[in-house]
Amino acid sequence: MPPKLAIMTAFFLQPIAFGSWLPQIPGVQERLALGPAELAIALLGLPTGILLMLPFAGQLVGRIGSRNTLLYGFPVFLALVPLPVAAPDIVSLFLLLVLLGMGLSTIELGLNVEADIIEKRGSASIMNRCHGFWSLGIMTGSLIGAGFLALHTSPALAIGLLSLLLVPVAFVVCRALPLHEMPAAETQPRSSWRLPSPGILGISLFVFGITMTEGAVADWSAVYLKDVFSTSGMATGMGYVVFAMMVSVGRFLGDAAKERFGPVVLARICLSFSLAGMLLVVVAPVTAIVYLGLGCVGLGVSVGFPLAVTASADLGDRPAAENVAILSFIALFGFLVGPPMIGFVAELSGLRSGLAMLLPPLLLSMLLAGLLRRGHSA
């Protein structure tokens, strides 16, 4: 299997099981009798685990290599995915999501570093397409999860079987990734706890509003459709499916668009779509408009994180694995801030107002898009 195909397949496989969990969130909320604020607190577990693990994940990838990180990390991650849906109470839900977040941060860092290595050793950009396959994978998982709802299947059993089926496939794909020696700077990673440089800080702030929006749509789109528009079954999970589908479209087109327009213009065009789409979601009178808005938001945020990964890896002020870890640590703080912010605002004035809180961070991302020029190679 060619290296580019192997890494793209790995990006596709990683989020399938996780995507099948997302449509189950309203059911878990109902089973545990959680209000919006309580659900927001429970959902903090995932980003908390991500943020706790990322400093160590950066050093781990630097020491054992991205290929080995994926080879050993996939089974652990897939074993953790089915656990939150079976949580008996809010405390266990939070703790299980912390564990899942720790596994997620490690494997996603490994994927991004491996993609960057393969891209640099090839002759064409692949980062956006890799993330496009990731979006296609999470869309596939969300469709599977919505199908579980339609069939009234036990979520824990269904997601567990799905994860079990994915383990051998992931192992074969990761074994097909190329063996390569890490550059000397990569084999002696410095501490990820150092203060970030101004360059990586700026790029991370650019992606902050984008990741906040991605996390918020993942956590709240199904709840929004169920609570505000009284959807049920598969229709509840379809909002995220539409979002993820358009993220995939944007990312598959992103590499060619980057070559034509450059990262700055591309990011600003896309963020215009995200701002318009979020406005549609907030004011939508019917479900169809919500789907349309979520599609625009998905297209709008599609290329932000891949562009930021490339820009941070190209800074050259420290090893690429460390810079990508710092980017992820700061940027994924959006996942930590977004869900509770929406939940607490929703508790006071409804989910429409909660989702409207995403508009200022998206506007900030648009204003900071010029920082991506640093990572653009002519």
Image (spheres, grey):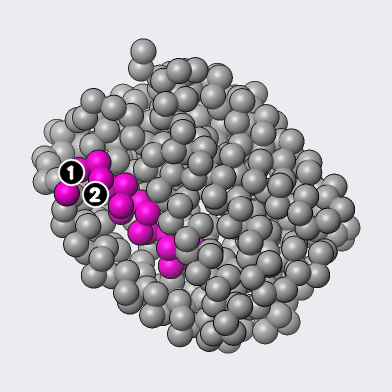
Q: Is residue 170 visible?
A: yes
| Image point (21%, 56%), residue name | 174
Of helix, strand and loop, which one carries label 2? helix
Q: Are marks 2 and 1 in contact (CB under 8 Å)?
A: yes
State left or right for residue 278 relative to residue 127.
Answer: right
Q: Is residue 101 visible?
A: no
Q: Position of residue 229 (x, y in %)?
A: 81, 64
Question: Which image quarter: residue 317?
Answer: top left
**Figure check: 28 above or below 265:** below
Other-residue count near label 1 (Cα within 10 Å), few / some / many at <14 / 14–19 / ≥20? few
Q: Position of residue 17 (x, y in %)?
A: 43, 67
**Figure check: 377 above or below 66:** above
Q: Which residues are magenta?
A: 1-19
Question: What is the three-letter code of the residue carrying label 1?
Answer: Pro
**Residue 2 shown in magenta:** yes
Main secondary structure found in the magenta portion: helix
Question: Which image quarter: residue 322?
Answer: top left
- Which labelled disc corresponds to residue 321? none
Question: Mark 1 = which residue?
Answer: 2
- Which labelled disc corresponds to residue 6? 2
How far is disc 2 from disc 1 in space, using C-alphas?
Answer: 6 Å
Question: Which image quarter: residue 157?
Answer: bottom left
Q: Position of residue 210 (x, y in %)?
A: 59, 40
